[in-house]
Image (tube, helix red, strand yellow):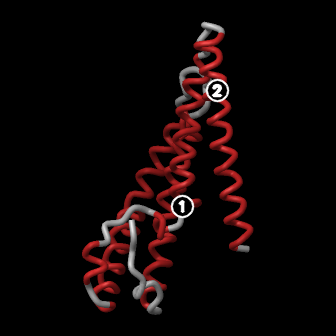
C-alpha cells in the first residue's frame, strides 16, 4: 500500500510539473512567437507552481532529502540526537497542527473567490497548503514514534 501511494504521489507530482512545463512553453510561444500573450497561461503557471511546490513538499520529497543544518547533529551523541529530533518534530508538527484549523477555515472561505482569468475557486488553488500541514503533522508523529524506537539516530546528516 505504501509503495503504491508513493508511486501515485510521484506520478501526480510529475503530471503537475509536466502541465506546468507545457503551459510555460505555450506562454513563451504565444508571447514571443506569435506576439499575442495569453492571460490564462500566466495564471495557470502560477497555480500549477503553487501545486507543484506544495505537493512535492508534502508527499514526494522524503524527510532525509530536505535541507538541514547538521553541524550540531553530527557533533553530539545518540541521546542528544534523540532529544533534538523529538523536540524538533514536536515543534514542527505541533505548529502545523495548531495552524491547521485556522488555515482550513481560510481556504474554505476562499471558495467564494475565483481566480481573475480562469475563475477557478481559490479554495482549489490553496488546498495543497492544507495537505502540507496535514503531512507535517503525520510525518512528525511518525518521526517521533520512530525516534522512541531508536531508529534514525545513528546516521549522520548531509546537506
Can you say which quadrant of the picture contains the C terminus?
A: bottom left
Q: Which residue is mark 2?
A: 25
Compared across the picture, whether 120 is left or right of 84 comes to right
Closer-to-camera residue (34/89): 34
| Image spot of residue 141 (x, y percent) | 47, 76
| Image spot of residue 82 (x, y percent) | 34, 86
Q: Image point 65% across, 18% down: which residue?
A: 29
Closer-to-camera residue (3/86): 3
Q: Image point 54% across, 35% down: which residue?
A: 122
User: Up-down: is 86 above or below 66?
Assistant: below
Q: Residue furthest top?
A: 35
Mark nearer the N terminus (2 vs 1)? 2
Compared across the picture, whether 33 is left or right of 94 comes to right
Compared across the picture, whether 133 is left or right of 82 comes to right
Q: Which residue is mark 1?
A: 61
Q: Image point 41% across, 88% down: which residue?
A: 154
Closer-to-camera residue (81/110): 81
User: Up-down: is 79 above or below 23?
Assistant: below
Q: Secondary structure at mark 2?
A: helix
Q: Residues within 10 Å of mark 1 (few under 14, many from 20)?
A: few
| Image spot of residue 21 (x, y percent) | 63, 35
User: Up-down: is 28 above or below 73?
Assistant: above
User: Up-down: is 107 above or below 118?
Assistant: below
Closer-to-camera residue (136/6): 6
Give the CA distance from mark 2 to mark 1: 26 Å
The label shown at residue 11 is none
Q: Residues within 10 Å of mark 2 (few under 14, many from 20)?
A: few
Q: Cβ–Cβ below 8 Å for labels 2 and 1?
A: no
Q: Secondary structure at mark 1?
A: loop
| Image spot of residue 138 (x, y percent) | 51, 70
Q: Image point 47% across, 88% down: which residue?
A: 151
Res 49 → quadrant: top right
Amino acid at each position: 500500500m505504501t509503495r503504491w501511494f508513493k508511486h501515485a504521489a510521484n506520478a501526480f507530482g510529475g503530471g503537475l510539473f509536466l502541465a506546468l512545463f507545457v503551459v510555460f512553453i505555450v506562454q513563451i510561444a504565444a508571447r514571443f512567437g506569435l506576439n499575442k500573450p495569453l492571460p490564462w497561461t500566466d495564471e495557470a503557471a502560477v497555480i500549477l507552481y503553487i501545486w507543484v511546490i506544495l505537493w512535492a513538499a508534502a508527499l514526494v520529497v522524503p524527510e532525509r532529502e530536505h535541507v538541514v543544518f547538521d553541524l550540531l547533529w553530527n557533533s553530539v551523541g545518540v541521546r542528544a540526537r534523540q532529544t533534538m529530533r523529538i523536540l524538533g518534530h514536536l515543534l514542527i508538527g505541533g505548529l502545523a497542527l495548531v495552524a491547521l484549523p485556522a488555515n482550513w477555515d481560510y481556504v474554505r472561505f476562499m471558495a467564494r473567490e475565483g481566480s481573475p482569468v480562469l475563475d477557478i475557486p481559490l479554495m482549489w488553488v490553496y488546498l495543497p497548503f492544507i495537505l502540507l500541514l496535514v503531512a507535517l503533522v503525520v510525518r512528525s508523529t511518525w518521526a517521533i514514534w520512530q525516534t522512541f524506537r531508536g531508529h534514525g539516530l545513528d546516521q549522520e546528516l548531509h546537506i
